[in-house]
Amino acid sequence: AQSVSQHNHHVILSEAASLELGCNYSYGGTVNLFWYVQYPGQHLQLLLKYFSGDPLVKGIKGFEAEFIKSKFSFNLRKPSVQWSDTAEYFCAVNARNTGGFKTIFGAGTRLFVKA
Amino acid sequence: GAVVSQHPSRVICKSGTSVKIECRSLDFQATTMFWYRQFPKKSLMLMATSNEGSKATYEQGVEKDKFLINHASLTLSTLTVTSAHPEDSSFYICSAASSTEETQYFGPGTRLLVL
């Protein structure tokens, strides 16, 4: 069955600390990979995506993610977090099917950055 | 970026009544729209996928007679919760994607409370 697993449900960091959020997926076919962010009181926004090409993708606000196909992973990183990065982060995979695609979301990771 | 709106943002209704939620893509043509339900501290659960002009494809366990989805135009999809019950209280989120890319753009969500 298709699934997306996010390793941490809650992460607490101090400002300037480095961040890495793990994401692994289970699907044997063609996938496109995403990280979405939901800031408090706001709707989901796209942080970055990988469709093909360079497996290291850069997104908005200094975030990046690396697709490692052999590990079925797409971990999110940021070298130095800010208080404003406090949010919930969702890893998602678009699994292609005959009718188009279907998005499978991970359970989310709540990040709290202490000022 | 692409903008998706939802209306209403929150609604309170009595048990047994029906509630309609609208999802609009404001600046692009959405060939595919998705409806999700988000439970507290949980990830998004895909309810159904709708392609413009076609019947929606419902996920396993989602009652299509209870959650009526209509996608009559390239900019509008509606979700009607029929004969709502307190257990239908939740946060409903729509997203939209164009035919040219698989990136989903999310609406701000609708909080439904059934008394």
Image (cartoon, coloured by chain):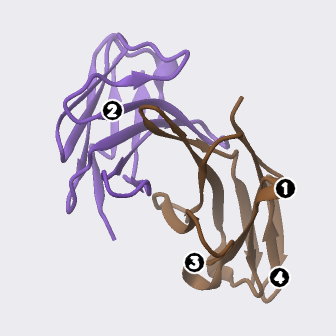
Chain colours: A brown, B purple
Q: Look at the numbered discs 4 and 3 and tell me whether their residues touch, using CB distance below 8 Å.
A: no
The residue shown at (20%, 63%) is B27
Q: Secondary structure beneath disc 4? A: loop
Q: Secondary structure beneath disc 3? A: loop
Q: How far apart are marks 2 and 3 (CA)?
A: 28 Å
Label ID, residue A59: 3
Which residue was labeled with disc 4? A18
Depth check, front residue: B85 or A101: A101
Within-10-Å neighbours for mark 4: few <14, some 14–19, many 20+: few
The residue shown at (25%, 33%) is B78
Label ID, residue B50: 2
Which residue was labeled with disc 1? A71
Question: Quadrant where the N terminus of chain A lies?
Answer: top right
Instruction: Give the image location of residue A45, x and y in percent.
Output: 48, 63
Q: Distance between the residues labelled 4 and 2?
A: 40 Å
Question: Quadrant where the C terminus of chain A lies?
Answer: bottom right
Q: Mark 2 lies on which chain?
A: B
Q: Do circles 4 and 3 both sit on a common chain?
A: yes
Q: Secondary structure beneath disc 2? A: strand
What amino acid is labelled 2 in the image? Ser
Within-10-Å neighbours for mark 2: few <14, some 14–19, many 20+: many
Q: Which chain carries label 1?
A: A
Q: How far apart are marks 4 and 1 (CA)?
A: 22 Å
Q: In this view, does A93 lie to the left or right of B56?
A: right
Task: Between label 4 and label 3, give the one nearer the viewer.
Answer: 3
Q: In this view, does B23 lie to the left or right of A89?
A: left
Which circle's residue, 4 or 3, is located before the other in the chain? 4
What amino acid is labelled 3 in the image? Gly
Q: Look at the numbered discs 2 and 3 and tell me whether their residues touch, using CB distance below 8 Å.
A: no
Within-10-Å neighbours for mark 1: few <14, some 14–19, many 20+: few
Q: Mark 3 lies on which chain?
A: A
Within-10-Å neighbours for mark 3: few <14, some 14–19, many 20+: some
